[in-house]
């Protein structure tokens, strides 16, 4: 065990920002601070409110440190986000919100220069979901500001820069559908060179590197020890995957849930990835390619259940299975395994709120299973994040895959993995309920009905 025990993890998700205190001795979160994280919809384009996030981070570090001495800081954030800073580390342009459609206006120009899927493992995605498209649009649309950039940073490393003054980049965020990285060469893609960006890319550092101690002014502001180390950090889905890479025997898969539901297969079946269905190659914290697939499941859940309590009963579940009330994809279009289909309900008359919640949970599990099939997943599936607490999601996922599902107990699945950057321990067995596939024929009948209905829509 490392001498460091209590790690503060800065976890910036697309919907919520968190600072969790992780106890490495028990691999558990012992304290958590949270705030809503929404874009600022102001000129020059929708962007992240980094100053509000920064105030939240510093206040959280200070309050957590008063409760329990913080030994180190680690960082994890959502993907598809990059930062342009000048020589002083200040923003030259606001940090663009990847749901902004501005980059689509130059889609034809960008498509002419972006590398093929075979080089990067990156599918062509809409909006700003390909980070290369964001940088391309910013360079074309704001040439004077872009010319002031001294460094391009991935989002976790932007926060590391603010904490330490050290600029770095790291492979998990660069390898997250950016068009900027070749996972098989472990080097920047041809796009980076053709656009002249290689010289702007901050130095590559492993996720586990200590970039430095916290800056003196921040130590004074938060009360942290001035020697508190800050680790380089990593992409959030890969943070969820890391504990399992260190402790689980392949084959297995991990489903990281948040705004996005990201499925990652380790040691699975050999399959040909289909970029048209939002499959991709992530790069894990050890630098290895990982077949992955995703859809915007957390966003779908929020929209579909808005204002409705989770008050289902077993009778509600039985009713949905018997009636075969189905929600077909996709509520959020433009990404996921069915990116161009519009959602529709079948046999959905006279549902109460509990029945509707059950049907929505089943839909999300069936979508997740589709993603797992597309990436050749095999062996047990661990669900991290909010969906791990949804018994109906977990039960249906076991039913449709026919494999064990482990529902992680961690409130924030990403925080444990990010905290492990601060230790050399290699066993990271997480706690969670093991759910076996249900034996009732009603579950199998529901799965078959959903699949047949999806196939019938073409």
Image (cartoon, helix red, strand yellow):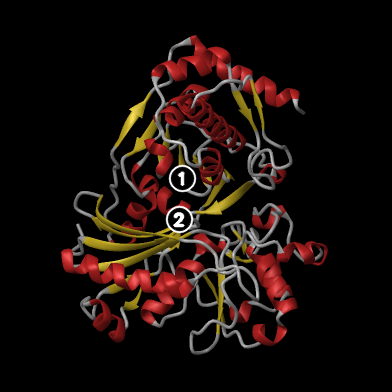
Q: Which residue, given by chain and number where applicable, does mark 1 sit on?
A: 256
Q: Which mark is residue 10?
A: none
Return the x and y of residue 376 as percentages of the image width and height.
57, 35
The residue wearing badge 2 is 236
Up-down: is 163 above or below 269?
Answer: below
CB within 8 Å, label 1 to label 2: yes
For the point 61% across and 17% down, the residue is: 448
Q: Quadrant of the C terminus?
A: top right
Query: Which quadrant would residue 389 be assigned to in this image?
Result: top left
Q: Is residue 457 left or right of residue 23?
A: right
**Looking at the picture, how far across and down is residue 318, in whole percent?**
46, 15
Label 1 element class: strand
Residue drawn at x 70%, y 68% as measured from the top left: 190
Residue positioned 37% across, 33% down in the render: 406
Q: Is residue 414 above or below residue 402?
A: below
Q: 321 or 92: which is nearer to us?
A: 321
Quadrant of the frame with the N terminus: bottom left
Q: Does any portion of residue 144 appear in the rendered image?
A: yes
Q: Could you classify mark 2 by the number of other residues whose Cα lies within 10 Å: few (under 14), some (14-19), or many (20 or more)?
A: many
- Measured along the vertical axis of the image, is residue 194 above or below residue 147? above
């Amino acid at each position: 065990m490392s001498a460091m025990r209590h790690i503060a993890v800065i976890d910036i998700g697309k919907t919520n920002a968190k600072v969790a205190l992780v106890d490495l001795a028990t691999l558990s979160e012992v304290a958590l601070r949270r705030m809503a994280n929404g874009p600022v919809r102001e000129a020059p384009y929708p962007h992240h409110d980094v100053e509000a996030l920064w105030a939240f981070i510093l206040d959280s570090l200070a309050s957590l440190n008063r409760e329990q001495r913080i030994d180190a800081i680690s960082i994890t954030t959502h993907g598809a986000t990059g930062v342009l800073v000048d020589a002083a580390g200040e923003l030259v342009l606001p940090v663009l919100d990847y749901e902004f459609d501005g980059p689509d206006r130059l889609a034809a120009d960008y498509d002419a220069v972006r590398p093929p899927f075979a080089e990067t493992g990156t599918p062509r995605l809409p909006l700003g979901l390909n980070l290369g498209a964001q940088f391309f649009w910013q360079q074309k649309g704001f040439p004077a500001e872009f010319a002031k950039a001294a460094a391009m940073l991935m989002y976790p490393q932007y926060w590391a820069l603010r904490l330490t003054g050290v600029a770095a980049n790291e492979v998990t965020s660069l390898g997250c559908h950016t068009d900027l990285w070749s996972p098989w060469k472990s080097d920047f893609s041809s796009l980076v060179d053709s656009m002249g960006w290689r010289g702007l890319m901050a130095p590559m550092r492993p996720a586990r590197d200590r970039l430095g101690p916290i800056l003196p002014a921040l130590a004074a502001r938060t009360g942290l020890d001035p020697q508190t180390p800050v680790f380089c950090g990593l992409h959030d889905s890969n943070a969820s995957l890391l504990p399992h890479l260190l402790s689980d025997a392949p084959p297995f898969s991990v489903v990281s849930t948040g705004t996005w539901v990201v499925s990652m297969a380790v040691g699975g079946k050999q399959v040909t990835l289909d970029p048209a269905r939002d499959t991709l190659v992530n790069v894990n914290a050890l630098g290895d390619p990982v077949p992955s697939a995703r859809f915007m499941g957390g966003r779908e859940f929020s929209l579909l259940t808005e204002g409705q309590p989770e008050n289902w009963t077993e009778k509600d579940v039985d009713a949905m299975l018997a009636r075969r009330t189905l929600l077909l994809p996709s509520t959020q279009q433009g990404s996921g395994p069915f990116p161009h289909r519009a959602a529709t309900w079948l046999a959905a008359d006279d549902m109460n709120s509990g029945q509707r919640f059950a049907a929505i949970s089943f839909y999300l599990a069936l979508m997740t299973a589709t993603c797992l099939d597309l990436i050749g997943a095999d062996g047990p599936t661990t669900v991290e994040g909010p969906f791990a607490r949804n018994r109906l999601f977990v039960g249906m996922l076991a039913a449709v895959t026919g494999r064990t599902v482990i529902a992680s107990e961690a409130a924030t699945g990403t925080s444990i993995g990010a905290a492990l950057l601060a230790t050399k321990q290699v066993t990271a067995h997480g706690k969670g309920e093991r759910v076996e596939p249900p034996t009732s024929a009603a579950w199998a009948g529901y799965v078959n009905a959903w699949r047949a209905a999806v196939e019938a829509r073409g």
